[in-house]
Structures are given as C-alpha cells and as structure tokens.
Image (cartoon, grey):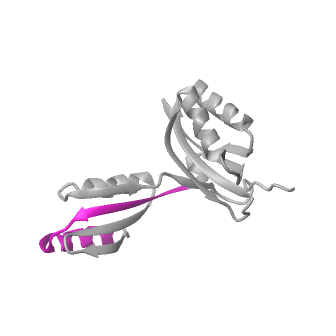
C-alpha cells in the first residue's frame, strides 16, 4: 500500500464534492483526508485528496475521478515537488500548574494559543503531518479534550505547474 496526494481543480458548483466522495464510496476506495476551497478565481474550487492503495487502485482512482463531470484537472502532488500543510486545533486540559509547560511546548513548535479558559487552552498548530504528530505525542502527559484536523492542503512548487483555464 502506498499513499498519494491528488490535487483537483473543479468547477465551483453544487454537488461536486458529493460526486467525488460518492465515487470513492461506491468503489470502496479510502479517503485519508480531503480538503476543498474556492481558488483565486471564484468559478473554481481546489480539492486536495489523500488516498492509499496499490499502484493499480491508485491509477484507477486517478482515471475515474478525471472522468467525473466538473473535473477540470487532476494531478498527483509529489512530496519532493510540492508543499503540504495541515491545520490542527487542540483543546488541552490545563490547570494553573500545567500551563507553563504547555506554553513552552507551544512556543517550541511555533504554535499559537488561541483561547484560554480557566481549565483549558486551545492551541492552533500549522505544519506538515510529521510536525503535528510530534506535537501531539509530546502532549502525552496532558489530557487532550478535543482535537480537530483539517487534512492536507497542498500546492506544487514553482510556476510551471500552475493550471490556467481559459473560458
């Protein structure tokens, strides 16, 4: 099993995300993460899908997604030629005695404390998956109350891989 990151450029229309996820569901393909957002051109949405399977399955995924209506482009984002980021929000139980240790750890990872309550903190961390996993593992001695992760968003490096759609 290997993992691939696909970047889709799609028409910004109702139901496009449902059609894509439905294809994965019908075929029994796994989606590890999926992110979507409008591009600089409001007619289009960029979707990043992380999926896994053997070579044959991954090739089928790419071919079948490319056939869907509203799909303008599908490309694999390779790690060496792309930048990936994920956002993670973590609510940690924090007594007065624990706060300083959590704040120090947050500073080391260049994360931000975005909410303080009498008994908890919410931490915002952005980075690659390895950074987020490392931070979470270092919070092991603390009680994580809630955790929300966005999934990977990615772009290819440089100007040569930019997709231009002329209408």
Q: Is residue 149 visible in this depiction of the protein?
A: yes
How many numbered circles are shown?
Answer: 0
Q: Is residue 38 above or below residue 16?
A: below
Q: Nearer the viewer, residue 2 or 48?
A: 48
Q: Please, is residue 142 above or below residue 18 in the view? A: below
Query: Taking 118 as reference, is 162 left or right?
Result: right
Residue 139 in view, yes or no: no
**What's the residue at 68%, 59% (across, down)?**
158
Which quadrant of the figure has residue 112? bottom left
Nearer to us in this view, 138 or 95: 95
Q: Residue at x 43, y 52 (%)?
A: 129
Q: Residue furthest top?
A: 56
Span shown in magenta: 84-108
Q: Is residue 79 left or right of residue 43?
A: left
**Is residue 158 inside the magenta stretch?**
no
Pick the residue in front: 94 or 16.
16
* In the depicted structure, whether residue 75 falls above or below residue 105: above
Q: Quadrant of residue 126?
A: bottom left
Q: Is residue 92 magenta?
A: yes
Is 104 left or right of 59, judged from the image as shown? Answer: left
The spot of residue 61 in percent (x, y) is 62, 32
> x, y (%) of residue 38?
65, 60
Residue reaching furthest right? 167
Tell me where residue 71 appears, x and y as whole percent: 73, 44
User: Quadrant of the image for the C terminus?
Assistant: bottom right
- Name the residue rendered at 68%, 31% in the picture: 64
């Amino acid at each position: 099993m290997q993992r691939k990151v696909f970047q889709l450029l799609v028409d910004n229309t109702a139901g496009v995300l449902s059609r894509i996820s439905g294809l994965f569901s019908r075929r029994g393909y796994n989606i590890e993460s999926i992110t979507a957002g409008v591009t600089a051109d409001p007619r289009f949405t960029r979707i990043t899908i992380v999926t896994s399977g053997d070579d044959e399955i991954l090739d089928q995924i790419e071919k079948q997604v490319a056939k869907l209506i509203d799909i303008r482009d599908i490309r694999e984002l390779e790690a060496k030629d792309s930048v990936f980021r994920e956002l993670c929000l973590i609510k940690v139980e924090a007594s007065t005695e624990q706060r300083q240790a959590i704040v120090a750890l947050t500073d080391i990872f260049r994360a931000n404390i975005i909410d303080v309550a009498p008994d908890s903190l919410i931490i915002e961390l952005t980075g690659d998956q390895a950074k987020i996993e490392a931070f979470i593992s270092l919070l092991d001695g603390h009680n994580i109350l809630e955790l929300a992760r966005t999934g990977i968003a990615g772009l290819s490096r440089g100007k040569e891989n930019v997709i231009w759609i002329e209408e």
